[in-house]
Amino acid sequence: MSETNKRNEHGKRAVQTTGHSWDGDLQEYNNPIPRWWLWAFYATVVFAVVYWFLYPAWPVGGTYTKGVMNTITYTGPGGEERTTHWNTRALLMRDMQEGTHAVRQREYLERVAAMSYNEIADDPDMMAFSRSVARGLFADNCAACHQVGGGGVPGVYPNLADDDWLWGGTFERIEETIREGRRGFMPAFPQFNARQLDDLASYVLSLSGHSVDADAAARGDDIFNGPTGGCMYCHGEGGTGGPAQGAPNLTNGLWQIVDVPSAPTLEGKKALVKRVVSEGAQRHMPTFQDRLSDAEIRALAVYVHSLGGGQ
Amino acid sequence: MTGSTVARVAIYPRSVKGRFRNLKWGILGLAYGVYFLLPWLRWDRGQGPSQAVLFDIPGRRFYLFDLVVYAQDIFWLAGLLIIAALLLFFVTGILGRVFCGYFCFQTLWTDVFLFVERFVQGERPARIRLAKAPWSVGKAAKLSLTHLLWLLIAMATAATFVLYWGDAPSLLVAMVTGEAPSAAYVTVFFLTATTYVMAGWAREQVCTYMCPYARFQSVMFDSDTRIVGYDTGRGEGKAGRAKLAPGLKTREERHAKGVGDCVDCGYCVQVCPTGIDIRNGLQIECISCALCIDACNNIMDHAGFPRGLIGYTSEKEQSGAPVRVLKPKTYGYGLALLVAVGALTWSVAAREPFELSVTQIRQPLAVTLSDGRVQNNYELKLTNKTNETARYAIGITGLQGAELEIGRFETVSLEPGRSVTLVAHVRVDPDEARQAQQDFKFVVEPVDGGDGRGEPRTWRSVFYIPSLERAEVSLVH
Ligand code: SF4
Ligand code: SF4
């Protein structure tokens, strides 16, 4: 096509050369760009300058040029009006308060707050919504201890994804746990001698099917279920647990407070149990009712319930 | 002209009548009819809005008559783009830049703006005169009217575009009463401005300087490709072109003097919307609109010469060689096009009545329950893509002795177009399982509703038992 462009006998659009030539005959066409193009370029420059004046732009020493459109007002988390220098974070805050999605989410949360747990559990939409809201809440508030997904840390922070609950796994009990926090306390038994401790540990391990010395276990049984230890006051007769006080169920092979499975030998397992008996145990989960709204606590309870073992 | 920039040379295309002009009006009428009326077409589809074509962004689905495109089907758009590209290659290889000349929005809207310009200011000479005339009330009135009409058309164009993204009647009312979302106004403003500037001011500059297609069209051309071409041999003769003058009136007289058939009337140049002289050969600016063909044919008819001095031709045809339409390139692009169209059609036709996806929850991957069984959790996502409410039964298969617990949703009812996400707990007794990782399937079956398309669908998943994994590892070592 450019070949034909060169023809200029008839057309007035002959392409001129820049006048340079190399190697004798190598020349450069002059195809100038249109002038409006240049003006469009200048317009972008002007736009940039206007932008500098409007918005925060240039770093100057320890500070920066502030711009004219330099404040932004949004509603803070507590409902108070806040005005700060313009920044995208404040813009996001405003959007999270006033944006259409934020408003929709709030409406949904209000519905969650107004529904009973049974109604939520029957409604797949509300279940899905509660779970998706609570996933973020859980990550912010709970995952540091209980881990993302609620798997817990063996022996330290209870696993919320199995069906073993220290304080009960119904919606209501979970809500109470989140709302008020929990203080788990098992008294220490320093008065027990080595033999008593060994007997007790044998009995406790036998409850979850470990093969131990039968005589030792029988003696441990007396301590556990009798007045010497009085363990059954909390752990229940036969060690089935007492969710009212957060006393673990000792019969199911799941260990929330002592990481028995981590010890490879029976002696090791016994040692772990003995230590808890002689030193006692104290666990503390903080209260969340001051940090989270009722609707959030409700959604969180639904989420925890659905992690795997809700009752 | 040796500076680094040049001022634009204003172009005042003359109107023309003829075959191609009629074709262009026809296509323009059709395109405008579809574009401006489509949002107003109602469509009863049993679910969702009753607008034939609606792009519902917040709801994340596109409604195209009876087809509802969900967000997860958006790859169809990629298919559509591939088809459009292949069609362009295919057509361009055979017919040249027909897209540019007949179907391109820039061409269509510029055409209408030109029509308005001529309607208000008159034919080419009148417009040139008006442009050169000193300012007067009459000139100001004519120019304002032109620009006003342009702005109105641009605004109608912009507003119509917005109507595709919401319920047209209520959205239009909302826009007029000032209650529409700000995005609507921003779009209207932006599209009005661009339409006005592009079709009113920039015109051929878009084709020449901005359009990328103009830049790579030539790679699709070959010597068989149809182009708008001037028959130099016939037009120029030995002694060049010459005006119709005494003694140069008939072809015989002209041929005797070695003069060609081109009467140098300049009509072909005057009608050209990109302002080029086709007699200099094919140029990058030529959008193949064929208006110069109409113009020259009119002149030829007038002079009593045969038509076709400018015509749709090809390099080969011009040199007298036979033209091949069915060349390897045609077959290649044609085949690719057929495959792409076939694949998209198949994909659309075979779309599932409901969509299922299962992901395993990996944190934690597995937990042991108090009865000794191992539990894995899965997240199921189910979307009802039919036009009626359907109830789905959810189960598993291929996992011996497993129990599925899915809250209260062994069956779940879904309204048309709705999705739901469920958590499924699967429990297995490790004593009965042999492998640490075992494949199994989720089975979802519509038990009623769903347009009677009740085949169950399965989704492969894996069940992990970490304690067995440890056992296997120790066996290996
Ligand atoms: S040269 Fe002819 S076909 Fe090409 S743009 Fe001009 S009028 Fe249209
Ligand atoms: S319209 Fe035909 S006759 Fe007139 S100048 Fe163009 S090519 Fe020549």
Image (cartoon, rainbow, N blue to C red):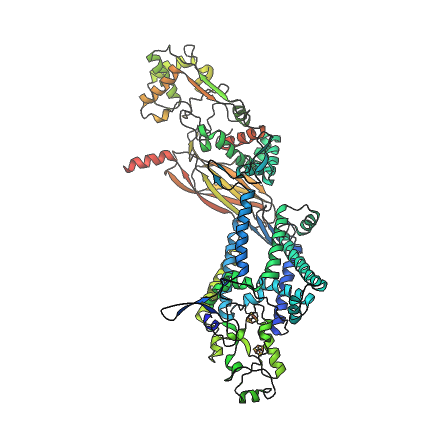
Residue that protrudes farthest toward the right in the picture: B137
Ligand 2 location (quadrant): bottom right
Q: Is residue A250 visible?
A: yes
Residue shown at 65% from the left, 62% from the top: B33
Query: Visible in this render: residue A125?
Result: no
Q: Along the horizontal axis of the image, is B51 left or right of A202?
A: right
- Measured from the top left, where is residue B35 in percent x and y? 63, 59
Residue A244 horizontal/vertical position (percent)? 51, 19
Q: How many marks?
A: 0
Residue B371 vertical position relative to residue B390 in the rendered view, above or below:
above
Question: Which residue is at 46% across, 14% downward?
Answer: A233
Whether B420 is drawn above or below B139: the answer is above
Q: Quadrant of residue B475?
A: top left
Work out whether residue B141 or residue A151 is closer to the camera in this orientation and state it.
Answer: B141
Q: Position of residue B270 (x, y in %)?
A: 60, 72
Q: Quadrant of the C terminus of chain B?
A: top left
Residue nearest the viewer, comparing B313 with A85: A85
B153 sits to left or right of B445: right
x then y, percent, for residue A9: 50, 77
